[in-house]
Amino acid sequence: MTQFWAFTRKKSSQYFFIVAIAFCTACLILLERPFIAVFSEEDQPSAFSSAETDDREIALTFNVSWGEEHVEPMLDTLQENDTTATFFVSGVWAERHTELLERMLDEGHDIGNYGYHFKPYTDQENEDMRRDMREGHNTIEEATGEPPVFFRPPAGIFNTEVLEAAEQMDYSVIHWGADGKDWQNPGVDQIVVNLMEDVEPGDVVMLDASDSAKQTADALPEIIEALEDEDYSLTSIEMLMSGAETDYEEL
């Protein structure tokens, strides 16, 4: 039997009002987020953001595209707490701060490719995007003597073409499952609250170590303490990915 939907004027008005509210809400959510989360089906190139696990383990990651003011105190905090993280650095930053890269490696941290320039890849032509990815890779390898194996697109914005380019360079693309929104500089206490409300077991945690994130260095000791109070343990991305199952969304 063929079914028909009939709307009276009142019902129609209610329907469009609901749609309008939903649309506005979606727009607000998108504006609040600094990235576009794009995942692919399991047999396609994909980004890793969280592991399905019952273990209360997470991996700390930091983005660094410019400045050095906050990197050293963050490294001090990580060292004091006997823990490690993954630093995603831009090629331009790597060229200017080789001594900090050396310290990161000496203290057991991983270094990932954050592109050469800090410019969203979806704003670039395919070949320009691939060139920037290669330049970032080569710069980090020249500075550290080790090729990076993890890649995070600048600003976390990517699409199918970016995922395919990264796969061809044998990268694991790392997104994040939890974000302290420290890039908004909302205050130390709020950064901790944001993260603890967002984090779940198996998450990759994203924080910012660039000079623009003025409160992250002060928040980091409190973040680590809050995570430990909730029985979370800090591990590496490699360990988190080992045997991990992830959810994929169709592009």
Image (cartoon, grey):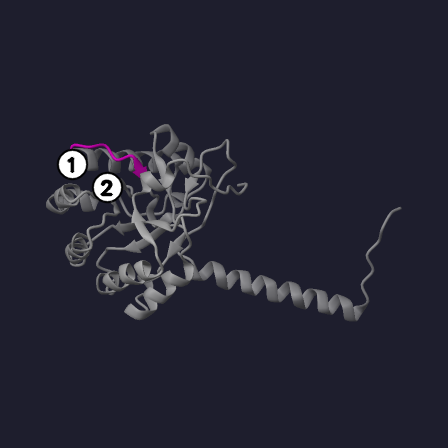
Q: Is residue 187 visible?
A: no
Judged left or right of residue 228, residue 79 is: left
Residue visible at 25% across and 47% down?
85
- Vertical placement of residue 138 versus 187, above or below: above
Residue type (three-letter) at the residue carrying disc 2: Ile
Q: Residue 41: horizontal and vertical position, in percent?
A: 52, 37
Q: Is residue 235 visible?
A: yes
Residue visible at 28% across and 55% down?
208
* Upstream in sequence: badge 2 or badge 1: 2
Judged left or right of residue 119, residue 5 is: right
Q: Are marks 2 and 1 in contact (CB under 8 Å)?
A: yes
Residue segment shown in magenta: 145-150
Residue type (three-letter) at the residue carrying disc 1: Thr
Mark 1 crowd level (few <14, some 14–19, many ≥20, 10 Å Cα): some
Q: Residue 100: horizontal and vertical position, in percent?
A: 13, 47
Dot 1 corresponds to which residue? 144
Does residue 146 belong to the magenta stretch?
A: yes
Task: Pick the residue in front: 248 or 165.
Answer: 248
Q: CA distance from mark 2 to mark 1?
A: 9 Å
Dot 2 corresponds to which residue? 111
